[in-house]
Image (tube, grey):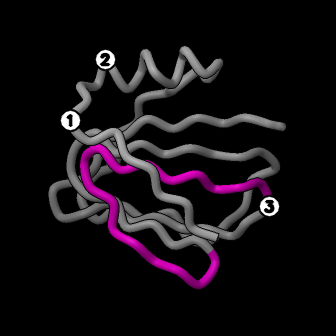
Amino acid sequence: MFDVTTYHGKTQAEIEASLREKGYFPALDMDEPGQEYPPHTHAEHHILVVLDGELEVQVEDDTQTLCAGDAVIILAHVKHATKAGLAGCTYFWVEYKD
């Protein structure tokens, strides 16, 4: 399952405020151009919100390229992988449990 939501037209501060209003604690991360995280899983759910650049995200057998304003929810124990675009990628990530 690949659930993409959008924050298009929102500033970094607005996105962070929106996530915090929902009770999340977003962490800012930056990946170098082409940086990859091979397929893996987590015990908790994750939200990734791209702020700048592109991030190729594979969730199980589905791969999509996210750009600024796109967000993906990755459920716990679901295999996923990421690869930053040619210009790298800046994004918020959030971990949460039910």
Which is the main secondary structure of the residues drawn in magenta?
strand
Q: Amino acid at mark 1?
A: Gly
Vertical placement of residue 82 versus 19, above or below: below
Q: Measuring from the top left, give residue 38's x and y in whole percent.
A: 55, 70
- Kindly report the distance in space between the C-alpha atoms of the residues bearing marks 2 and 3: 30 Å
Q: Measuring from the top left, give residue 19's x and y in whole percent.
A: 51, 24
Q: Is residue 23 magenta?
A: no
Residue wearing tag 2:
13
Residue wearing tag 1:
9
The residue nearer to you, when weighing 80 against 69, is 69
- Kindly report the distance in space between the C-alpha atoms of the residues bearing marks 1 and 2: 12 Å
Query: Mark 2 falls on what kind of element?
Result: helix
Which tag is nearer the camera, tag 1 or tag 3?
A: 1
Q: Measuring from the top left, give residue 62's x and y in whole percent.
A: 53, 80
Q: Amino acid at mark 2?
A: Ala
Residue wearing tag 3:
77
Left or right: where 6 falls relative to 51: right
Q: Which residues are magenta?
A: 60-76
Query: Badge 3 local density, few (<14 within 10 Å), some, or many (20+)?
Result: few
Q: Quadrant of the C terminus?
A: top right
Residue at x-position 54% and y-position 17%: 20
Q: Amino acid at mark 3?
A: His
**Residue 64 in which image quadrant:** bottom left
Vertical placement of residue 5 versus 1, above or below: above
